Amino acid sequence: MPETLPRVGIPDLDAPDTPGLSDRVREAGGEPVPLEVFGPCPGGGVALAREWFADRAAVAIPAARLDALLAVTGRPEEVSALLLASLRTDLPLVFVSRPSDPFSAAVAALGLAPLSGEAVETAVEVARSGGPEFGKLIESFSFANALRASLSLRGGPETVLHLMALSREAVLPGFSRMLRVLAPEIPAVTDPGSRWFEEHGVPGLFAYLGDDLNDTRSITGGFKEGLPPAPEAPGEDAGPSPVFVKGRASSTEGLCLPRGTVEDGKVSGQCRTFTSEDAAVRAVARGDVEAGHL
């Protein structure tokens, strides 16, 4: 009887950023399985889109009888949805890491992207061996790595929003306090559009952060295995890091990614409040939220 090939799910196989991915899975000894996960969803912002896609993926994965999931760089709410679905279905997940945004760097810091070697081959091997599952890689130290990586790359509220959802799904208490403690002490190192990041990428960023990152488990073994030598410090100013803003009357607190210069770690401006994410999204689309508004 011929050996059964490990089945590797690839969401939206025909997406522009997945050319030839099915052929590469076959060459590595796996069977590519297309998944229809993304597409139209109700309006209302990235949080609703993430949950909508996560529910679709969590239904599609068991029906497809997958052994592993291969996630491709995409919009943060799409990648976050696949992470949630992987947790809900106890399925190993490998991230094709060419991160160009802070949330993708956070996913790599969670240990889901091979920092050296071929991600497709890793996905097939993980599917064949049956692990490790994403849920077994998650711990407080890996979330601290994700926060540090994303904030070092000038990540802001959207990245934190998705990491918060992951921590809830993984039943990992204390993320809010971790954010409150770590965010003020993590300086921005560079931004995704810098020459330094284009040259060194996420492995170079992790090597530069060095001992500030925890050596946790990853999809390929130790998180720090295979990192390059630490590069020199970026010569460009990455801009201000995220800061917490607090309403004077309500004491409501939130993370803000400011533009320009921040004096004494403080920002101020006219505060706009909304009753829902959908209302806030509509206000931004109408142009009601202007520069200087919080």
Image (tube, rainbow, N blue to C red):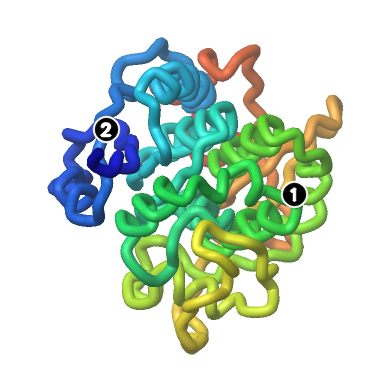
Identify the residue shown where x is 57% and y is 60%. Answer: 218
| Residue 91 place in picture, x, y as percent | 51, 36
Identify the residue shown where x is 73% and y is 58%. Answer: 141
Determine which of the numbered discs, if any, sits on residue 81 in the image.
Answer: none
Q: Is residue 134 left or right of residue 65?
A: right
Q: Is residue 32 left or right of residue 38?
A: left
**What whole-number distance in Å separates the C-alpha atoms at marks 2 and 1?**
37 Å
Q: Residue pushed farthest front?
A: 1
| Residue 89 place in picture, x, y as percent | 54, 28
Q: Nearer the viewer, residue 13 or 251?
A: 13
Q: Residue tagged by mark 2?
A: 33
Q: Is residue 116 left or right of residue 50?
A: left
Q: Residue tagged by mark 1?
A: 179
Q: Nearer the viewer, residue 258 or 70?
A: 70
Count how many numbered circles sit on residues in the image: 2
Q: Secondary structure at mark 1?
A: helix
* Residue 265 visible at all: yes
